[in-house]
Image (tube, rainbow, N blue to C red):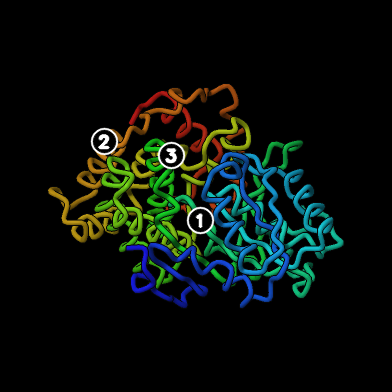
């Protein structure tokens, strides 16, 4: 499956090359975007792996003077962005290659934003029209290569960066943060361990599911979300049980991109809680969404019962209703090794009131199907910590 005949060219929501072996076109794609000295942004774990070494070698063989930056935390912070901007300027780069999972992708996109700005990073937090403060012409071109099937950040116009001092995750938004070129190559995800395949795959599910349940009117996004959920239903267990299943890996990396495309319709309480929990406990974002999922579904039931029943019929579940869908989510989590409660990953209720307030202030709370108060978010958190459905 690594020949060029298996590679598809898509043009939604940006230019995408999808298929096994697509990474072979990396150097040419960089040149098409006008890059001659790109900065490849990745994370420390990936930086030492053969896939990054191979990508760098291929780019250099293609005549590109590429440099690598990998000082990125699993929940990227503003200091990572500052260091990346300094690295970009130090070697006079002319573009960004975002290579890795959600953390590397988010950091890379914000580095691309900040290399030409004179305002501080937090001036571009996704509030009102803050994005218009940016000098759009000074944003570096971005090419994205995901190596996990979870966040879908490669097709998004926003990135999440943690303010360590305030212990808050901020969304940074600008239309030009949408990479101009994406390479979806399932072969790059083959080495992802089963537990990370599971957590990132559930993250893709959470994006599609919350987008589908959002009350915002966007039928195109709803259609994408429903099909993305079907792909997770059919292929995530296969990808977890057999990491070498290229077809399953291809379908999951597609479902991931579909989720991030669909969530322009909005997200909800899973993310409204996962963001503060990630900032305070430095926990894996996809794993948080995976654990929170059934608790949030039940909390939102009165507003999403009909939508979930239609989805259940589309998935051909044995019980095509809300209860049957929740049963599937619980069975899926158990099958792929997702913990049932937040307590199992070291999260407690000591800051429940603070987290409840933070959840209501998170931008994703605005499109939850049910408007929740800080007290209701705190109660939801307690149920998820204690494993009480």
Give the quadrant of the N terminus. Answer: bottom left
Query: Which quadrant of the figure has residue 3?
Result: bottom left
Q: Earlier in the sequence, mark 2 or mark 1?
A: 1
Of the pair 179 and 282, the residue shown nearer to us:
179
Q: Which mark is residue 224?
A: none
Q: Position of residue 54 (x, y in %)?
A: 55, 54
Q: Which mark is residue 146?
A: 1
Q: Residues within 10 Å of mark 2 (few under 14, many from 20)?
A: few
Number of the front mark, 3 or 2: 3
What is the residue that sits farthest to the right in this orientation?
118
Q: CA distance from mark 3 to mark 1?
A: 14 Å
Number of the front mark, 2 or 1: 1
What is the residue that sits farthest to the left in this orientation?
318
Give the quadrant of the C terminus. Answer: top left
Query: Which quadrant of the figure has residue 2?
Result: bottom left
- 346 left or right of 327 in image: right
Q: Residues within 10 Å of mark 3 (few under 14, many from 20)?
A: some
Of the pair 46 and 274, the residue shown nearer to us:
46
Residue in the image at 45% along x and 42% along y: 289
Q: Position of residue 39 (x, y in %)?
A: 70, 58
Q: CA distance from mark 2 to mark 1?
A: 25 Å
Q: Which residue is mark 3?
A: 196
Residue in the image at 52% along x and 50% along y: 51
Q: Secondary structure at mark 2?
A: helix
Q: Position of residue 32 (x, y in %)?
A: 61, 77
Q: Which residue is mark 2?
A: 335
């Amino acid at each position: 499956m690594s020949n060029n005949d298996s590679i598809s060219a898509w043009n939604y929501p940006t230019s995408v090359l999808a298929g096994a072996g697509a990474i072979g076109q990396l150097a040419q794609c960089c040149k098409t975007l006008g890059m001659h000295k790109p900065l490849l942004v990745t994370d420390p774990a990936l930086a030492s792996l053969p896939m990054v070494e191979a990508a760098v070698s291929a780019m250099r063989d293609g005549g590109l003077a590429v440099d690598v930056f990998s000082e990125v935390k699993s929940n990227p912070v503003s200091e990572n962005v500052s260091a990346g901007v300094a690295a970009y300027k130090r070697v006079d780069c002319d573009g960004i290659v975002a290579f890795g999972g959600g953390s590397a992708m988010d950091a890379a996109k914000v580095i691309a934003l900040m290399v030409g700005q004179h305002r501080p990073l937090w001036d571009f937090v996704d509030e009102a029209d803050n994005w218009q403060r940016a000098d759009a012409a000074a944003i570096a071109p971005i090419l994205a290569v995901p190596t996990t099937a979870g966040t879908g950040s490669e097709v998004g116009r926003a990135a999440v960066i943690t303010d360590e001092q305030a212990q808050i995750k901020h969304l940074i938004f600008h239309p030009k943060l949408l990479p101009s070129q994406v390479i979806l190559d399932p072969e790059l995800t083959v080495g992802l361990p089963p537990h990370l395949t599971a957590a990132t795959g559930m993250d893709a599910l959470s994006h599609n599911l919350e987008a589908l349940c959002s009350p915002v009117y966007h039928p195109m996004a709803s259609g994408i979300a429903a099909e993305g959920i079907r792909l997770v239903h059919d292929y995530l267990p296969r990808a977890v049980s057999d990491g070498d299943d290229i077809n399953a890996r291809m379908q999951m990396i597609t479902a991931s991109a579909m989720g991030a495309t669909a969530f322009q319709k909005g997200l909800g309480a899973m993310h409204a809680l996962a963001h503060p929990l990630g900032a305070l406990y430095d926990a894996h974002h996809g794993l948080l969404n995976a654990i929170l999922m059934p608790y949030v579904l039940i909390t939102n039931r009165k507003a999403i019962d009909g939508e979930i029943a239609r989805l259940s019929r589309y998935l051909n579940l044995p019980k095509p209703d809300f209860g049957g869908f929740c049963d599937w989510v619980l069975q899926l989590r158990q099958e792929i090794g997702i913990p049932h409660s937040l307590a199992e990953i070291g999260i407690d209720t000591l800051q429940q009131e603070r987290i409840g307030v933070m959840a209501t202030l998170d931008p994703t709370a605005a499109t939850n199907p049910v408007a929740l108060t800080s007290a209701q978010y705190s109660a939801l958190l307690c149920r998820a910590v204690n494993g009480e459905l």
